[in-house]
Amino acid sequence: MSREQSLRRPGLLAVAVLSVACSSAGSSTRAEAGDQLRFGVDMARRGLWSEALFRFEQTRQERPNDPKVLNNIAVAYEAVGRFDDALATYKQAIAAAPGNRDLKTNYSRFLEFYQNYRGGKLPATAGAEPAKPGAPARPRQNASFR
């Protein structure tokens, strides 16, 4: 092996190690996001909504447009009384997955609750169909999340 080849070899090894480290860091981050999501769901089931919201927001950093994560955040916002934030987050989730039935159900029920909460008026930015007439307002603790 020539001197020039031996000088290049450590550089190639460093690049290979760096690329492996970066790819494993990415998968580690994805795994951490999944752990955060699972922990958030567990906290939500226990009624610890502030902790659940924190965990869902941590997951959102890795998965900003994941409809499941956005749905969970919206449900948690409802539970802690941040209804305007819940509305905005549901809208973002619907935009990310317009065909998701569970999400549409959650959103529809939230809109009915929110309309009742606001005295029968939705903000002009609600931009969605109201829930079916006669459907009961959804208690926040019964929201569907995963």
Image (cartoon, rainbow, N blue to C red):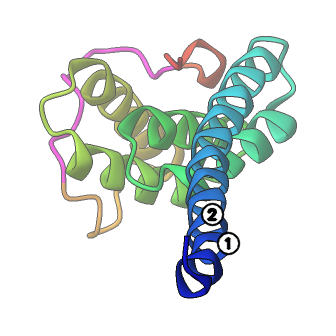
- Which residue matches tag 1? 10
Please provide percent x and percent y for residue 33. Answer: 65, 39
**Badge 2 element:** helix
Q: Is residue 11 left or right of residue 119?
A: right
**Badge 1 element:** helix
Residue 145 in magenta stretch? no
Q: Residue at 35% x, 65% y: name it.
A: 123
Task: Characterize the local packing of mark 2: few (<14), some (14-19) or many (20 or more) Cα atoms within 10 angstroms.
Answer: few
- Which residue matches tag 2? 13
Rendered-image quadrant of the N terminus: bottom right
Q: Residue at 40% x, 43% y: name it.
A: 66
Task: Give 121 or 105, whichever is nearer the viewer.
Answer: 105
Picture quadrant of residue 99: top left
Please provide percent x and percent y for residue 133. Answer: 20, 22
Q: Are marks 1 and 2 in contact (CB under 8 Å)?
A: yes
Q: Residue at 29% x, 31% y: name it.
A: 108
Task: Give 143 or 120, whichever is nearer the viewer.
Answer: 143
Picture quadrant of residue 111: top left
Task: Give 63 or 89, whichever is nearer the viewer.
Answer: 63
Look at label 2 and name its amino acid.
Answer: Leu
Vertical comparison of 110 with 127: above or below = above
Boundaries of the magenta span: 128-138
Picture quadrant of residue 97: top left
Magenta stretch secondary structure, dominant: loop
